[in-house]
Each structure stands twice: as C-alpha cells, then as structure tokens.
Image (tube, rainbow, N blue to C red):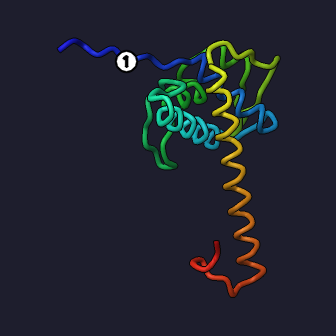
Amino acid sequence: MGTKVYPEFNTQKATEASALLMGMHGGRMSKVKLLKLLYLSDRKAFELWERPITYDVYYSMNNGQVLSGVLDIINNQIIEPIWKKHIKGAGHSLELIGENIKVKKMSRAEVGLQKRILLFRLEVYYSLTEYAWRAITKPQISLFQYK
C-alpha cells in the first residue's frame, strides 16, 4: 500500500470564500456565522464533488463544527497576508476592507455554491422568523401543526 497524500488547507480559497460570503452579506459578518457558512459550503462541496473547497480540518467545538485553519487565522494564531489584506476582525465580527477580492483559485461552481449556501441560510432564517411570528400572533398553532 502506498502512502496517501492529502491536499493541504488552501488559505487563498478560504479567504476568497470568506470574502465572497461577507460581500454578499453587506461586508460584515459575525465570526461564528462565517465559520458555519464555510463549514456548510465545504460539506456541500464534498457531497457534490467529493472534495471540499478549503481543504481545512474540522473540529467540533462548543458552538458546533468549525474550520480550524480559518479559526486560527481569525484568532491571529496564523498570520496570513492575503486574509489581512481583505478581512479584519472587530470584536465578535469581521469586516471586509480594501479592494474587492479577485477570485483566482475558486471555480465558478464553487462561487455559485457560496451564493446558494448564503441564500439557503437566509431562507431558513426567514422561515424561522415567519414561524416565530405566526406562533406569537396565533398561539393556537402548536409546533407540530405548523408546516
């Protein structure tokens, strides 16, 4: 049996994916939200194409799964110039800075997947918001009756 070689964490693609998601979200996003969206993107990419976008390593933390390399960059445990050029941290949120990132490493399919992941998140949010509103305004609806 030969030794298996696995691709390494791709900081360029992780930065591009992060900047695209943040750009589609108004340029700001919480760290946790970004980590969750990147995780969902990698999982969906693996489901569709049998490979993730970032090739990061995943860890299960108190708030769920995270991409460890991206988390290390966000927490300044890894200094990554491409990240620092486009994204800065402020408390619990991240903000796009400088010029728009040019997508160099991500494929069109990966960019399209990022858009679908963000739209899916918005659909879920608005569905939950609508459900909560209906539950409050019409208390006779139980959790099991609403569709």
Q: Position of residue 135 (x, y in %)?
A: 71, 77
Q: Position of residue 117 (x, y in %)?
A: 64, 40
Circle 1: is it few (<14), some (14-19), or many (20+) Cα within 10 Å? Answer: few
Relative vertical location of residue 146 with respect to residue 5 in this rendering, above or below: below
Q: Quadrant of the N terminus?
A: top left
Q: Is mark 1 on a helix, strand or loop?
A: loop
- Count of marks overlaid on the render: 1
Q: In which quarter of the image is residue 147?
A: bottom right
Relative vertical location of residue 74 with respect to residue 143 in this rendering, above or below: above
Q: Quadrant of residue 144?
A: bottom right
Q: Where is mark 1, residue-wise?
A: 6
Q: Is residue 26 left or right of residue 140?
A: right
Q: Position of residue 118 (x, y in %)?
A: 69, 41
Q: Position of residue 6 (x, y in %)?
A: 37, 18
Q: In this view, does 16 lie to the left or right of 79?
A: right
**9 vs 84, nearest the viewer:** 9
